[in-house]
Image (tube, coloured by chain):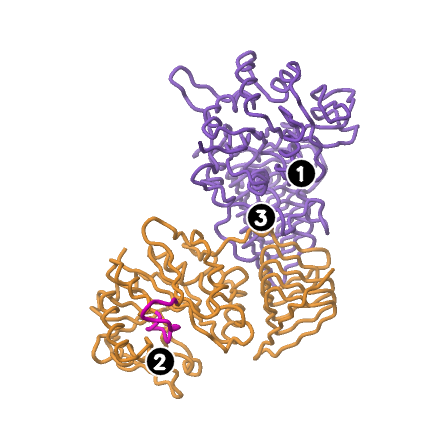
Chain colours: A orange, B purple
Amino acid sequence: MRALGIILAGGNNERLLDLTHYRAVAAMPIAGCYRAIDFPLSNMSNSGIKKVAVITQYNSQSLIEHLSSSKWWDFGRKQGGLFVLSPHITSENSLWYRGTADAIYQNISFLKNSHEPYAIITSGDGIYRMNYNEVLEYHVSKRADMTIVCTEMDMEEAKNYGVIEMDDQNRIINFEEKPLEPQSRLASTGVYIIRRRLLIELLEEISKEGRFDIVNDIIIRYRKKKKIFAYVHQGYWKCIARLKGYYNANMDFLKKENRDYFFRTYPYIASKVADEPPAKFNFGAVVNNSLVGSGSIINGRVENSVTFRKVFVGEHSVVRNSLILDNAFIGKNCYIENCIVDSKSNLPDGSIYKGEKAEPRIVINKTPLYL
Amino acid sequence: MRKKEIIAMLLAGGQGSRLGILTKHLAKPAIAFGGKYKIIDFPLSNCINSGIDTVGVLTQYQPLRLNSHIGIGIPWDLDKTFGGVTILPPYLTSKTGEWYSGTANAVYQNIGFIDYYSPEYVLILSGDHIYKMDYEMMLSAHKNKNADVSIAVLEVPYDEAHRFGIMNTNEEDRIIEFEEKPEKPKSNLASMGIYIFNWKSLKEALLKVNGVQQKLDFGKHVIPYMLENEKDIYAYKFKGFWKDVGTLQAYWEANMELIDLVPEFNLYEAFWKIYTKNEMQPPGYTSPNAYIERCIIGEGTEIYGQVYNSVIGSNVCIGENTVIRDSIIMSDATICDGCEINKCIISEESHIGNGVKMGIGDNIISKDYPNLYNTGITVIGEKATIPDNITIGKNCALYGTLLPEYFDEGELLSGDSLIEEEVEL
């Protein structure tokens, strides 16, 4: 294989509020049965990449638990495999990762000991399908030093991302991180392709200067010195690192075209197998325009919502426009609207939670219930 | 020396001929059950949950589906370096080669496989029952009694006892007599087809009895031989749900029991999970106009119509204005718009066209196969195609790619069957 993969899944994120109190962003549950990292990880595996490193730091336990066996993504082979790289103390270094570039630099032996000519770097919080081979072909044909995958979005939305300006050859001439006034609709998806040796060289160079970030210290700083090209991704792409984005990305799966694109287009997105029984709809269940995960038991009304695995909804309860994460228990006569109910929450009988459509409310109640 | 204390031999070669076209191209253990499972998932999951990590699966009849389902045993954690799951089909030797003739003969032909693991005990299972059972408890009872053989038994109602192999025991649960389907049963302890043998005693018995008769079965030959030779045979009383889904009616009923509010056989307990092969597992989708009542619905299924009292598999599509009642729809089936389906079993990957009505009319027993289709259930075989706007009665059996001209005035009356022999395999 011509490339190795690096998934940056270490980021802390306060914009998901309490939902990431105990879990990494890359371990956020998506679409009823996935975790965010399943998308880049499956893309890697489906593109034939054999060797993948997942770089974790913040709240890594939830993620490591999910990655405890790499067989679900067809890694765990004699050649290559899945490597989870957490910060570690060596005789020279006892620091946490100080940035995306530093995280890779601290594991530079992983790069040095590989023989693949290219490295594909992606963030762990993007929901998308991509055949990285196509991007790699493009990268080679452009004779680029680095290729950044970008996607078009609204100007308003683009303010939250790295905005790219490119010339008619698609070479990047300007890159602004989270600009107040975006100059283009093209935003970086955080997927990069770079020659492995060049990456090693750049990482060593910037670390000598005490710089630690891929975007600021490599892309923006080297954009004139190196040939950095943009590859425009046409399909679905959404970042879940903000609450609204997370909520919308889940709700997008209520649309048939998105389900067909992610669930029914081969090669499939893989995830850790949960072995839950089929979902059960008892007498009195009314479920409209919703996704119901396996192992769920529904006795009440569920509308325009996504319930994840092993959710229980009691009699005469109403769930509207909400995300109910794994293992949540909702008692009888509850009313839940525009909420995100965290996994393993227990909502006693008669609970009422209402959020705003523009600002879904996070509901976390892990007090144990004794039935 | 490396060895296993106990290994399991799972008999999965049975045809299950009373299940009609459901077993046309697959063995009974490979039939779908409860939405996403296959029948063989239950004994296989019981094995790994009981700590038995070496299982030989004896296949003979239509093994293709079974082989691809089991693979190297990953879903059940039975992919092991020493042990794990091994599929054991009949094979040729330099002198002869023969099919498995009977359950015990199948084990006899695989003495080499068992000896490779040099076990103390061998657990014999059959691949066609639905139950959850801790074989480890049975093994410890077997050891406590110092038995040569333990046979799992279930208390059945006396008026049904004539359908089973009945064990007559003394007060210490020692089996003193075995009667196969007795007219006047002396006890109500029915054999579940689950045996634990001391491998030494079993091997000795197999070598003695094999070849005496054409067939060699555990119930008919091996156990009687051991009784004759005064071996220590004990009954192990099992309490819990155990179901033989041998007939279409029993199969249908066992599926329907799963949709009770709290089913006797509860798949939703966190303890004792049942594992199965599933590569793809997105959540099921229910459209704004859909209505679902008293159902279990598999993963990735899209429902646009109305479904009542039914068991739906994975990745099924049910179209708009379709009404389904009291039916079993297996995985990957597609049911188009405007259909009406009552009390049917629709097999995997079948395609039902628009406006098809099924299970309509009087309950007339099947003309060609009165022993199979007689309880009002209409059965569609796997990969069958039913064209648009066809009306199908009760007790019908349909198989193959069916064209509109095969139907008289777009109708198949109750009791008729339409089985199109396939051209390609």
Residue A95: in magenta span: yes
Q: Secondary structure at mark 3?
A: loop
Per the rendering, the mark at residue B313 is: 3
Closest to the camera, between mark 2 and mark 3, is: 2
Q: Are marks 2 and 3 on the same chain?
A: no
Chain part drawn in magenta: A88-103
- Determine crowd level at label 3: few under 14, some 14-19, many 20+ residues with C-alpha closer than 10 A: many
Residue A119: in magenta span: no
Residue ID for mark 1: B377
- Label count reads 3
| Type of amino acid at the residue the image marks with label 1 | Ile
C-alpha span from label 1 to label 2 = 62 Å
Residue ID for mark 2: A163
At 58% across and 48% down in the image, what residue appears? B313
In front of the other: B17 or A15: A15
Q: Are marks 3 and 1 on the same chain?
A: yes
At 64% across and 32% down in the image, what residue appears? B246
Left/right of residue B307 with respect to residue B186 in the rendered view = left
Give percent across and percent down for residue A121. Answer: 33, 67
- Determine crowd level at label 2: few under 14, some 14-19, many 20+ residues with C-alpha closer than 10 A: many
Closest to the camera, between mark 3 and mark 1, is: 3
